[in-house]
């Protein structure tokens, strides 16, 4: 395709010019002509809450100070209430219906008690669209109210912040008069004038560039796809996925296949996979003050991308081969939906000052997709078996570390990384430092950040071991592979999570759907598994299974998920098609959603959720005919790909899987290997 475009320069120029025109039109439509309207101004002020007469003029008692701090929290709530805001609006000569306020809870209470329900969230969404917004916080342990005002201009924002205390003062004075008191007994003293300015001066340019790149990229992709379909290459691959078994005129095995090769890219890919399995890379960060978090994976992956691009440009027999399958189409559709969700809602995200949060999450999306396309283009069809075995070995080593953590309460992945990495890297602490959750379960996480992530990682690799046991003809190989399966399951169960049974069972059921007879022959292995799990992780299986007792299903880990369903309804209905924007739903500001399904529905809408689910579905759909063909060489690999995709989809319903990159990287890596198998050309 690249050679064809270079040979037809007029066609290439036409594609670039047409895409550029579409990108410019989309930019004008999204940004508009009044760029100043996209700039948001904010100001802050600080108000001291005191008594009348001042507390310092009386004998100060600790109880008096604590009472004053408690009163400050109540006054902060009152400052953002409608009666006070109406007084502020009158002083500013602004219509009251254009002004809204919110008080952020700072009390030491459980997060579940401060999460907004559906009614509060609906009112919050309406308030965020107002041009004048007030955010109030009572400073913990001090009689000070922090006031943050947002308005169309810096001068209005400063006036807004300065007037908030005056509006509350008038309200308290009127309330005291209605109750027959001469004074409210409260003195509000502002600590200096409000300070502020434009807080998103680069927003117009950012939105314009993002919109142009999205419009250009999407239109160019569609045009190139139409050209390719007209030439017949990807269309036949999608219509006839079973053609992957057809001979290609190339030898099945090459003398320089990985690992017996000097080609750089296959070794770089293998090294990156070792990093995923053996290091807590998402907790390892470069000690540098930069706009984005430089996690270890985002430091290593760009070098692989550069090498990939250089190899593509150089060409030759060792160059990566671009393929097109249903899996590629599904991954591409997900990226398009994620980007469109930000572009279409960019003005709203700019108004709520959440556009930066979405933009900071885009590099993570690019990293995910880059690994998929690198794997799908670098790995030869004849190398997939070797990479699959290598992945099983890495997962077995990871399982040993997790079992060690369960038995000896020491996380080797974090401890060794902290000791061996140079000082320029900072290794974060284990996310659950206490090690015990609210229902008494220890946190066993391996190189991941939470137990559920470790469960998803191991569950996706479990089909490799089971299929290898089914395919193995030698007893030595079968025993070693069965031992690896035992390690994987023991490590999974050692996490103490209900998902440790649900996710592996989903993988086994997928295998049973395609290979019932072969799987029944392994029934004796099931008994061995139970014994080995008890030996490696004593008590873990019973502790995990008992969590499915009906009397234990009312715990917070279940109830917290169910209350999320109604609470996100306002966000879903507000942006039904494409959501509120990729990466914009911050659990610190809103709710902690323990489900990637809910995250995608809120951030990317119904269309984005379908695109996300389509990635897993596409892997299964693309492999069905090849699995049914029962080719002794390629059908087992296709079966592994299908059985690995199902646990990923299941895990997505159990936790926010895309927020924890270990599992997502591994899924897209396995999807990339699967795409090599089902593609027409090796």
Image (cartoon, rainbow, N blue to C red):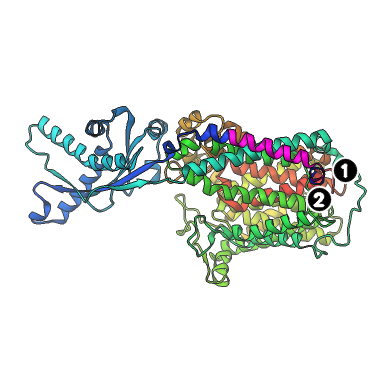
Q: Residue at x 72, y 35 (%)?
A: 223
Tally the numbered discs: 2
The prevailing secondary structure element of the residues shown in magenta is: helix
Label 1 or label 2, whichever comes before in sequence order: 1
Q: Which residues are magenta?
A: 6-25
Q: Residue at x 25, y 44 (%)?
A: 73
In the rendered image, residue 481, in percent from the top left (x then y), is placed at 76, 58
Image side of residue 46 versus residue 288, left or right: left
Q: Is residue 664 visible?
A: no
Q: Residue at x 68, y 35 (%)?
A: 18
Task: Name the one closer to the observer, 278 or 609.
Answer: 609
In the rendered image, residue 524, in percent from the top left (x then y), is placed at 76, 51
Which label lies toward us, 1 or 2?
1
Task: Name the one closer to the observer, 582 or 657.
Answer: 582
What secondary structure is marked by label 2?
helix
Alpha-carbon neighbours of circle 1 within 10 Å: few (<14), some, or many (≥20)?
some
In the rendered image, residue 532, in percent from the top left (x then y), is placed at 68, 58
Q: Is residue 665 above or below residue 153?
A: below
Residue 245 is marked as 1
In the rendered image, residue 235, in percent from the top left (x then y), is placed at 81, 35
Task: Name the quadrant of the N terminus.
Answer: top right
Q: Is residue 386 visible?
A: yes
Task: Name the one closer to the observer, 541 or 177.
Answer: 177
Q: What residue sits right under mark 2 in the picture?
A: 470
Q: Is residue 15 magenta?
A: yes
Q: CA–CA distance between discs 1 and 2?
A: 21 Å
């Amino acid at each position: 395709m690249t050679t064809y475009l270079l040979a037809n320069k007029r066609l290439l120029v036409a594609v670039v010019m047409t895409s550029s025109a579409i990108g410019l039109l989309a930019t004008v439509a999204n940004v508009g002509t009044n760029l100043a309207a996209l700039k948001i101004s904010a100001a802050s002020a600080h108000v001291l809450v005191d008594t009348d007469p001042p507390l310092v003029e009386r004998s100060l008692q600790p109880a008096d100070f604590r009472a004053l701090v408690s009163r400050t929290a109540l006054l902060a709530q009152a400052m953002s209430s409608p009666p006070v805001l109406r007084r502020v609006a009158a002083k500013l000569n602004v219509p009251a219906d254009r002004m809204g306020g919110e008080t952020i809870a700072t009390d030491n209470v459980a997060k579940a008690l401060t999460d907004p329900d559906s009614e509060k969230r609906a009112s919050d969404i309406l308030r965020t669209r107002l041009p004048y917004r007030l955010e109030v916080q009572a400073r913990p342990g001090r009689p000070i109210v922090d006031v943050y005002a947002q308005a169309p201009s810096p001068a209005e924002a400063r006036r807004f912040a300065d007037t908030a205390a005056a509006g509350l003062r008038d309200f308290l004075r009127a309330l005291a008069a209605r109750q027959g008191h001469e004074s409210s007994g409260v003195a509000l003293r502002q600590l200096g004038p409000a300070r502020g300015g434009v807080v998103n001066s680069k927003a117009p340019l950012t939105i314009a560039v993002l919109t142009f790149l999205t419009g250009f990229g999407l239109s160019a992709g569609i045009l190139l796809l139409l050209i390719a379909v007209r030439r017949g290459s990807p269309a036949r691959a999608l219509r006839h996925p079973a053609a992957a078994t057809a001979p290609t005129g190339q030898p099945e095995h090459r003398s320089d296949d990985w690992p017996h090769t000097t080609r750089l890219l296959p070794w770089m890919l293998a090294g990156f996979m070792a990093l995923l399995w053996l290091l807590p890379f998402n907790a390892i960060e470069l000690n540098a003050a930069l706009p984005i978090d430089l996690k270890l994976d985002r430091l290593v992956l760009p070098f692989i991308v550069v090498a990939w691009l250089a190899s593509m440009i150089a060409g030759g027999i060792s160059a990566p081969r671009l393929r097109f399958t249903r899996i590629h189409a599904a991954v591409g559709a997900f990226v398009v939906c994620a980007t469109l969700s930000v572009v279409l809602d960019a003005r709203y995200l700019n108004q709520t000052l959440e556009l930066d949060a979405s933009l900071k999450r885009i590099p993570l999306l690019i990293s995910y997709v880059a690994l998929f396309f690198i794997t799908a283009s670098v790995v030869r069809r004849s190398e997939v078996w070797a990479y699959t075995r290598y992945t099983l070995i890495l997962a077995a080593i990871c399982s040993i570390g997790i079992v060690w953590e369960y038995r000896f309460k020491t996380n080797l992945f974090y401890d060794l990384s902290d000791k061996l990495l140079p000082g320029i890297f900072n290794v974060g602490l284990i996310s659950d430092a206490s090690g015990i959750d609210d229902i008494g379960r220890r946190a066993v996480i391996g190189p991941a950040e939470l137990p559920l992530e470790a469960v998803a990682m191991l569950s996706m690799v479990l089909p490799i071991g089971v299929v290898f046991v089914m395919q193995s003809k030698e007893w030595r190989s079968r025993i070693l592979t069965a031992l690896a399966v035992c390690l994987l399951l023991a490590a999974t169960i050692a996490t103490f999570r209900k998902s440790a049974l649900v996710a592996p069972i989903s993988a086994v059921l997928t295998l049973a759907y395609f290979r019932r007879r072969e799987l029944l022959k392994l029934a004796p292995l099931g008994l061995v598994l139970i014994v080995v799990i008890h030996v490696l992780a004593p008590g873990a299986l019973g502790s995990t299974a008992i969590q499915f007792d009906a009397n234990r299903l009312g715990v917070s880990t279940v109830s917290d998920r169910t209350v999320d369903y109604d609470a996100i309804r306002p966000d879903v209905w507000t942006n039904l098609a494409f959501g509120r924007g990729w990466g914009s739903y911050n659990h610190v500001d809103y709710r902690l959603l323990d489900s990637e399904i809910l995250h995608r529905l809120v951030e990317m809408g119904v269309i984005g959720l379908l695109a996300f689910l389509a990635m897993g579905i596409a892997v299964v759909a693309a492999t069905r005919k090849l699995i049914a063909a029962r080719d002794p060489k390629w059908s087992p690999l296709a079966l592994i790909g299908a059985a690995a995709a199902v646990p990923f989809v299941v895990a997505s319903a159990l936790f926010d899987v895309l927020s924890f990159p270990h599992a997502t990287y591994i899924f897209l890596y396995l999807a990339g290997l699967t795409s090599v198998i089902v593609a027409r050309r090796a």
